[in-house]
Amino acid sequence: MGKLLRSALFEVYERYGGTPVEFAGWEMPVEYEGLVPEHNAVRNAAGLFDVSHMGQLTVEGKDAEAFMQYMVSNDVAAAGDHQIQYTHFCRPDGGIVDDFLIYKYNKDRYLLIVNAVNVDKDFAWLNEHKGDFDVKLENLSDQFSAVALQGPKSEEILQQLTDIDLSAMKPFRFQDDVIVNGAKALVSRNGYTGEDGFEIYLGNDDVVALWDKLFEVGKDKGLVPAGLGARDTLRFEANLPLYGNEMADDISPLEASLGFFVKLDKESDFIGKEALKKQKDGGLTRKVMAFELKGKGIARQGAEVVADGKVIGFVTTGYKSPTLGKVLGKAMLDIEYAKIGTPIQIKVRNKTIDAEVVSSKFLG
Amino acid sequence: MKIVEGNLYTKDHEWVKIDGNEAFVGISDHAQHSLGDIVYVELPDVGDEFDKGEAFAVVESTKAASDVYLPVAGKVIEVNEALDDAPELVNEDAFANWIAKIELSGDADTSDLMDAAAYKEFCENE
């Protein structure tokens, strides 16, 4: 294994009680005080995450819109300037290369925030398909750090460090060249927790000062440092998928129950369009669904799902939900079982535990 | 961190309290603390026999599932059924809330186990 990457915030982890572990090629903390208290703080007050591991790729040029339309399954033209859109790169067979957010400056300029584990793959994928499109592609991942401030108190906390009126910023919008704690930053209103919140992208030299300052002004509002563990339980409860769990290069966005983000009716052709159309017309053979465990135990990623004496799927994510206290999960299920109310069973070690397919809107 | 005198400890943070040819086993306070909120304990069945060092139970926190290894060879003669409904008891008191009571298979091999003082030092240096 190669040398692990460290974010510019590496030195703060220990100061704030976190122990870094290996994650997606990075050394980052899974938790500080503890996963569950951090999870609850984000639901009830605020939490601060280092998200510097996420990749930043840019697409610019006079063919940028046409190129993006060809590369992604969502309709880039439908997004307004300074709007953020969720989408996928798909393979020709419909499998997912990555899922990510497009920050659209205007039709000629896009910033892609991609999964840490896929940065190199995505950048290569863009370059591989560039062809005659007049676009400039850049991987700026090394040049930026980022923090995610998440939770109902986020606006109140961040407002103390910037002059722009955050209450005027709508969800899934961003603003560039914002001065935050005296440094130039890009601020967006979004996150990966199901709560209100902001992501702040800024230079590597400015991020430690911002982190410390956020705690200075946010501590009495309940702000806590939060690690990758809480990031995963929070996104899971909020019905947000994770690449490598609900998505993979042999899983299509339709199978991942993300068809809403696939615009098969957009005019432009895009990589995977034909395969996805065929999949939709022919009917899916499997689909990611949510389940609740009825018996005792925890069903984690990779566990087999069985019904009628045969294997009918696999668990993609599973937790005892800190917010709801129920044991919940997501699983890829054969289509005949992908219906709410269907009884299924999960194999955990040498036990078979009863479960039921439920709505994925866990938090209502 | 709490460490109970009289117990013996493993490098994997299990404890065993031997009394004659029987013993109680559980995980240490250090272990419950690093696991975080415990949400499930998979108990062995009474009558199951395990070798020394064999996984006999699983403790699951929100983060992860961790095997619990038997510090000495033996046969399970009782399990702490309270943990089935209230696994968080292990967080509250990891020493009072043993996982299993075992009957030792012959003379217990305790040569690699640590006493309280040695375990304290082990934890501090880990």
Image: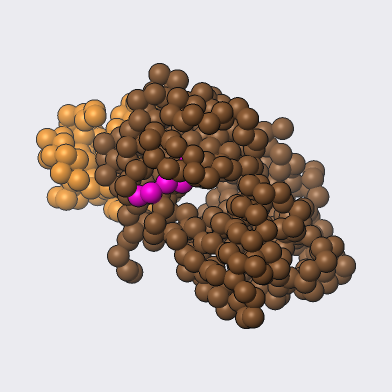
Chain colours: A brown, B orange
Quarter of the image holding residue A171? top right
Question: Which residue sits at x=83%, y=66%?
Answer: A267
Residue A328 location (% of width, % of height): 62, 41
Left or right: B103 in relation to A346: left
Q: Which residue range is magenta in the image?
A: A200-204
Q: Residue furthest top?
A: A220
Residue A10 location (% of width, % of height): 30, 47
Looking at the image, can residue B35 be seen? Answer: no
Name the residue nearer the viewer: B10 or A166: A166
The correct choice, above or below, for A57 with respect to A241 in the image is: below
Q: Quadrant of the C terminus of chain A?
A: top right
The correct choice, above or below, for A130 with respect to A163 in the image is: below
Name the residue nearer the viewer: B36 or A166: A166
Q: Residue furthest right?
A: A281
Residue A19 location (% of width, % of height): 31, 44
State yes or no: residue B40 in magenta: no
Q: Residue furthest front?
A: A62
Question: Which residue sits at x=53%, y=31%?
Answer: A164
Question: Which residue sits at x=87%, y=67%?
Answer: A281
Name the dominant secondary structure of the magenta segment. Answer: strand
Left or right: B96 in relation to A278: left
Name the residue nearer the viewer: A280 or B31: A280
Residue A52 location (% of width, % of height): 42, 50
Q: Quadrant of the N terminus of chain A?
A: bottom left
Quarter of the image holding residue A100? bottom right
